[in-house]
Amino acid sequence: MEKRFIAFCCLLVLPYASLAQLSSPVKPAPDGFWGVFSGTPDNDPAEVAQLSAAADEAEMQPPDGGGRVPVEWRAAVLLAVNHHPAISSSVATLESAGFGVDNASAGYLPAIKAGITSGRQQDEDSGQIATLGLSQMLYDFGKTGSAVDRATASYLRQQASLLAQIDSVIEQTALALNEVFRYTRQLENARKQVRALRDILRLTELRAAAGASTRVDPVQAQARVEAAEAQQQESEIKLRQARYHLQALLGQPVADRPLSAPPDLQPLIRQIGAKLDLNRNPAVLMAQADAAIASAELRNSKAQRYPTLSLEASSNKYIGDISRYQSRSQYQNVYLSLNSTLYQGGALAAQENASARALAAAREAVNSQKLELTDRQRNAFQSMKGLQSNINILSRRLRTITETRALYREQYLALGNRNVLDLLNAEQEISRAELDLINARSDLWAAAVEYIVLAGWAREAFSIDPLSVQGSRQTADEL
């Protein structure tokens, strides 16, 4: 019975102990040979307390109305680009890739090493030998060159990744601004509908009080007013959500005031033309960089089959008792070294075959990326054409229903051959036509943004200079 009780307690404690272990930061184990005999080091309590105290909190009701959004849309997009942490991460990764190129290029330069050995030297006595050596690679059949090419391709890929991240933030911010503008117009339309229906309600109440109509008309009008008020409240909620989303992208509270009209993107689209250069899209550039990385790795794999020729020079000095047994306490060596791996159990052949397959896959990935990009660009282009045609139809419909409302109101008041339902329906048809027109125009602008982003012209459209994003200064021929 006692053993069962102990086992039951262990089962209860085990999950909590595992969670405590996972939640604690792991400290690196000792390096070197003696690390084999060392256990996992304990975590520093002060470090654990510091990490635990660094928890972030998110406010479910962000401050509203205290900020100041730039009236000009391009200024708002620039603010988001300079604020977004994903771009900061890409800039830091790009700088890290630049140091990777320097690291690979260092293989062309000589290496200078110094060291000292201590212990029994030959059969004479104990002592030390101090060594200063220089090694210069003379020819390695492309090992260093392929490593430099791989690092350079990785740097170019990270440049394209940074451009892709900038374009993504531009698109997100532009679409968020568009949604704020859309729901602002929708809210204005809803308020306008409520005012118009309330006017009809007052008119029906006056006619019912005068005996010109029954009490049914005010009841019907009141029901339509309440439905329009519910729609107005829904528009207010959507506008508030869109503002909070924009606030997250801009990194500051959004002022409760209308935005200016969005910039006209059609002149830039006409300048781009119907045929697009796929190589301007960062996704294609990343795929091409991946192919260049795979090509460099294949050349490096092939170079591993051949030897490396290097020049070696060293200066050695005996220190301690051993120096008494030497004719000279210091001596120098200069020689050519030729090193090669003769056999690795088939590892070189396997690595070369794997690199060849990776290069083939990377080249197909470039074609796949271009195919997908072309399809998305065509869809966006056709969507713009369809929305432009739809806007013309909706504009004519709005003019027609507006004239119809005026005729219905005249017939209701003067002739009496129209009932209040005709007036209410006409008013709602106008509101629906205006709502459809608002959505169509916003959808057209969103499709234009998508088309420009896919074409690789987003930075030009919103005057974003990638050379100076978040303090990143690259040379003009790099980005």
Image (tube, helix red, strand yellow):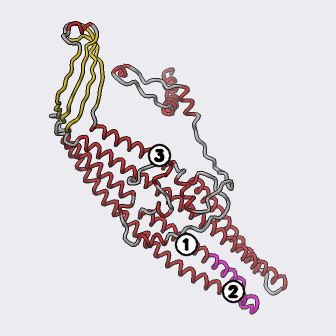
Q: Is residue 346 above or below residue 333?
A: below
User: What residue is at 61 percent from the left and 84 percent from the top?
Assistant: 399
* Measured Cα–Cα span from mark 1 to mark 3: 35 Å
Give x and y (percent) for residue 133. Answer: 26, 25
Q: Which residue is mark 1?
A: 441
The secondary structure type at the circle numbered 1 is helix
Q: Is residue 473 magenta?
A: no
Start-end of magenta stretch: 410-431
User: What residue is at 68 percent from the left and 64 percent from the top?
Assistant: 233
The amino acid marked with disc number 1 is Arg
State which quadrant residue 433 falls in: bottom right
Give x and y (percent) for residue 124. Answer: 20, 7
Left or right: 472 as drawn, with respect to 187: left
Q: Residues within 10 Å of mark 1 (few under 14, many from 20)?
A: some
Q: Nearer the viewer, mark 3 or mark 2?
A: 3
Q: How many marks?
A: 3
- Principal secondary structure, stretch drawn in magenta: helix
Q: Is residue 151 above or below residue 242?
A: above
Q: Answer with mark 1 or mark 3, whichever residue precedes in sequence.
A: 3
Give x and y (percent) for residue 318. Answer: 25, 13
Q: Which residue is mark 3?
A: 89
